[in-house]
């Protein structure tokens, strides 16, 4: 049996599609619990930042950061030691999915394991994006919170700079978790694709995520440059005004060309509509 590695969100939606059992319910409990804790952390980060968390004291903020890292490490262990093993075992031995012709994320993964069907690139992409995203969460929030605390031996960055990083990343994480991980990606497997367009969902997904990532990176670089007096505030604003539309247009054209190239043997109006508009389609 080939084990499948999934983000916690997709594991929970896979388990929801299965017949109720003790193992399935345990898997759902832990997968939902992990996501709730993550959402609480994101919201807490935003609230603490908006409340100017310097007032809570150095020890309190440092303790919160360490506790968060330890809890997230523990949740990662739970995901790999409990949620994913349960999901894989239930996918390997599931007569309901074997006889069920209705499309779902669980049915797709069952066919991948049992019938050697090729796994959707959307699942593969979502898995890797989540792995990279939450690795950055460990790095960014641990670093930025400590940089905001005087007396730790780090160069104290301006509060606005670090606050913007925390709020932007936490807000983007909440949107990504609820909109992409728990709605759009699972929805793509809810029906059988009548007119499947290769790379459509993957290209649109990467276009949005990578565009946001480039924006985020540029903002960080520009804020550091302003802080170090390399550029002025006006230059910062002018650069953002010019660069952001250019990046958006280049990424948009890139994703459109990828979709057209992937479907070069079957070009039709649906392919061009999918390429130049953000139109999700069902996965095979």
Image (cartoon, rainbow, N blue to C red):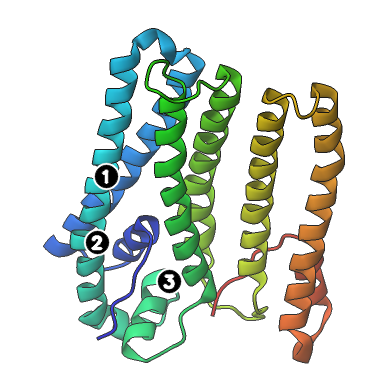
Residue 68, position in %: x, y? 30, 35
Q: Which residue position holds label 3?
A: 104
As displayed, is residue 20 above or below residue 48? below
| Mark 3 neighbour class, 10 Å CA radius: few under 14, some 14 to 19, many 20 or more | many
Side of 109 relative to 81 (left or right) = right
Pointer 2 residue: 80
Give the residue at x 79% y 30%. 236
Whether residue 279 is situated above or below residue 262 in the rendered picture: above
Q: Secondary structure at mark 2?
A: helix
Q: Which residue appears farthest toward the front when viewing the image?
A: 153
Q: Sequence order check: which comes first, mark 2 or mark 3? A: 2
Query: Hey, which quadrant is residue 3 in on the image?
Result: bottom left
Where does the image place residue 149, in percent across and percent down from the top left? 41, 19
Horizontally, residue 137 falls left or right of residue 161, namely: left
The Cα atoms of the two marked residues, 1 and 2, are separated by 14 Å
Checking the image for residue 117, the label placed there is none
Q: Nearer the viewer, residue 61 or 113?
A: 61
């Amino acid at each position: 049996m080939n084990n499948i590695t999934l983000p916690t969100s997709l594991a929970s939606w896979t388990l929801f599609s299965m017949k109720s059992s003790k193992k399935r319910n345990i898997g759902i409990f832990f997968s939902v619990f992990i996501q709730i804790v993550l959402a609480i952390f994101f919201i807490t980060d935003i609230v603490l930042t908006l409340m100017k968390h310097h007032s809570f004291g150095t020890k309190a903020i440092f303790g919160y950061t360490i506790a968060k890292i330890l809890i997230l490490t523990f949740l990662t262990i739970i995901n790999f030691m409990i949620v994913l093993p349960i999901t894989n075992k239930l996918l390997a031995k599931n007569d309901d999915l074997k006889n069920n012709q209705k499309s779902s994320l669980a049915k797709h993964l069952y066919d991948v394991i049992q019938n050697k069907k090729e796994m959707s690139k959307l699942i593969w992409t979502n898995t890797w994006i989540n792995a990279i995203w939450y690795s950055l969460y460990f790095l960014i929030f641990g670093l930025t919170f400590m940089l905001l605390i005087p007396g730790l031996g780090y160069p104290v960055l301006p509060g606005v700079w670090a606050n913007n990083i925390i709020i932007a990343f936490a807000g983007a994480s909440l949107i990504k978790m609820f909109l992409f991980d728990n709605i759009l990606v699972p929805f793509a497997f809810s029906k059988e694709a009548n007119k499947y367009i290769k790379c459509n969902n993957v290209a649109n997904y990467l276009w949005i995520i990578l565009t946001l990532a480039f924006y985020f990176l540029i903002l960080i670089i520009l804020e550091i440059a302003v802080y170090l007096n390399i550029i002025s505030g006006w230059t910062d604003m002018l650069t953002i005004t010019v660069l952001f539309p250019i990046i958006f247009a280049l990424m948009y054209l890139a994703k459109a060309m990828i979709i057209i190239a992937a479907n070069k043997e079957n070009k039709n109006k649906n392919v061009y509509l999918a390429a130049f508009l953000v139109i999700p389609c069902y996965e095979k």
